[in-house]
Image (cartoon, grey):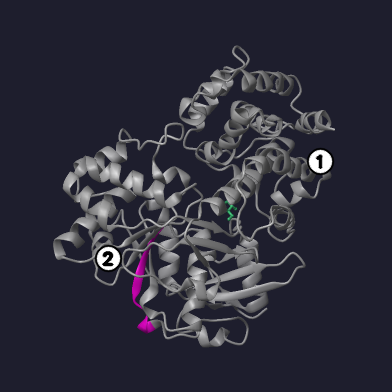
Amino acid sequence: MKEAIALNQKNLPLFAEKLACPQYDRSRVKAGIVHIGVGGFHRSHQAYYTDRLMNESDASDWGICGVGLRDADRKIGDILEKQDYLYTLIVKHPDGRIENRVIGSIVDFLLGCDDPSAVIDRMAHADTKIVSLTITEGGYNFNAATGEFDCMNPAVKHDIANPGHPQTVFGFLTAALKQRRAAGLPAFTIQSCDNIQHNGNMARKVMLAFAQEQDADLAEWIATEVKFPNAMVDRITPVTTADDIRYLESELELKDEWPVTCEPFIQWVIEDSFSNGRPSWESVGAQFVPDVTPYETMKIRLLNAGHSVLGLLGSLHGHPTIDVCVAETLFATYLRRFMDFEVTPVLEPVEGIELDDYKDCLIERFGNPNIKDNLARICLESSSKLPKFLIATIRENLANGGSIEYATLVIAAWCYYSDKGVNQHGEQLDIVDAMKAELHQAAAATARDPLAFLKVEPVFGDLVYNKTFTHTYTTMIQAIYENPKIGQHMQAVLFGRE
Ligand code: CS2
């Protein structure tokens, strides 16, 4: 094997015959977008669309300046800088075909914890037209049960008191918008790319709640000047592995320290509401629509919830990845029936989408054997995901007298998972959740009080007072604690239905 060549701007011509590379002059690209949260998903989705746009038309005003706010973002920043912000996207098809592409749309990176002013100045710069976010569900800092912004969070309290030295995304956005207003510049758009129902409305709500605490006059300006488009974002992007890095080295003699892998499917449905212009992403496949709501609900309640169903049940069972789960008939059937019996009845029709086809396509996507999407990633931060992905569906079914068994078993499994931290074979699970300790403590009281886990109010709200729900849940929780073999309980739910 020849020595792999480092990916960077100078070496780019050496790769041109082996994989798709940026065809545009990157030295002319200005950062019109500042993006907070340069994880795998941003790099497989928004940065990919933008790279294609730059290849296909003159979009040099829409380059991306990546931003990380925390020390944990240092590694990606250092690697991107070393590689002139280039990275490889490895698209893995179910039949084994692989398409590789070097993405060039990111042109800079700033680390907020090192130099907050540099980030604020960049956002406040006249070239910046959009600040986009992938800060995860938890990043919006709202109480999942009440939907209200949490002003008591210590970092938020710090930012309210120290306008010039922010730590949180809200502090940075507010400081930059303040600077723009003082300079007479138009506001930028705040564009959420997270899996949150009405992600734009949510971003607006938390942003205004924060700004109101800090500077009421500025909050009013933000309310009228800043647009927050809602959007549905979709592309399954597993965690990058050492094998992905080795694959590029051995197959393409390319050394990329942090490539991204993803599935071929991609979708982005955006509300066309921007404060200060936008790239014409529609020319590379994004859809601009007047109302994103039905698309978001469909995607969050089927795909993301479907992931959580497999993630939690599969973790207890001892399955490693999503594709391994759906390869087992029991899991595939359970997932499909959850979608058919519990989610479909609460969804609005979506124009141009046949729900049965959408569900078939989801199961096919989950089954892609080359996207080894590990369950630890799926279960990451379940406390901020499940209220919107799954519990919302339970609530609506309770209100309509619909089926709740499929989803309730997942909540019972989540309790056992949070309590014991091991799968049914007694093997340790890798649990990462901001509320891990609180969930564990509540779940550990289940033996005394079967409803203890449901008393975590920020997650479950008042669900614990719903008798129909607690009746089903109590039966399931007792059964799981007596015998954690989750497959048997899944079967019980399935057969109860036949
Ligand atoms: C997953 C998502 O863990 C999760 O929440 O469901 O990351 C999912 O893979 C993406 O939303 C796909 O678009």
Residue 330's tag is 1
Residue 84 image-quadrant placement: bottom left
Coordinates of residue 149 in the picture (x, y in percent): 35, 38
* Total residue callouts: 2
- 179 relative to 330, above or below: below
| Residue 13 on the magenta span | no
Coordinates of residue 489 in the picture (x, y in percent): 77, 29
Residue 122's tag is 2
Coordinates of residue 357 in the picture (x, y in percent): 73, 57
CA–CA distance in space, label 1 to label 2: 51 Å
Residue 465's tag is none
Three-letter residue code for mark 2: Arg
Q: Earlier in the sequence, mark 1 or mark 2?
A: 2
What main secondary structure does the magenta stretch of the protein show? strand
Q: Is residue 432 visible?
A: no
In front of the other: 213 or 297: 297
- Name the element at disc 1: helix
| Residue 29 on the magenta span | yes
User: Residues in magenta?
Assistant: 27-36
Quick one: quadrant of the N terminus?
Answer: bottom right
- Name the element at disc 2: helix
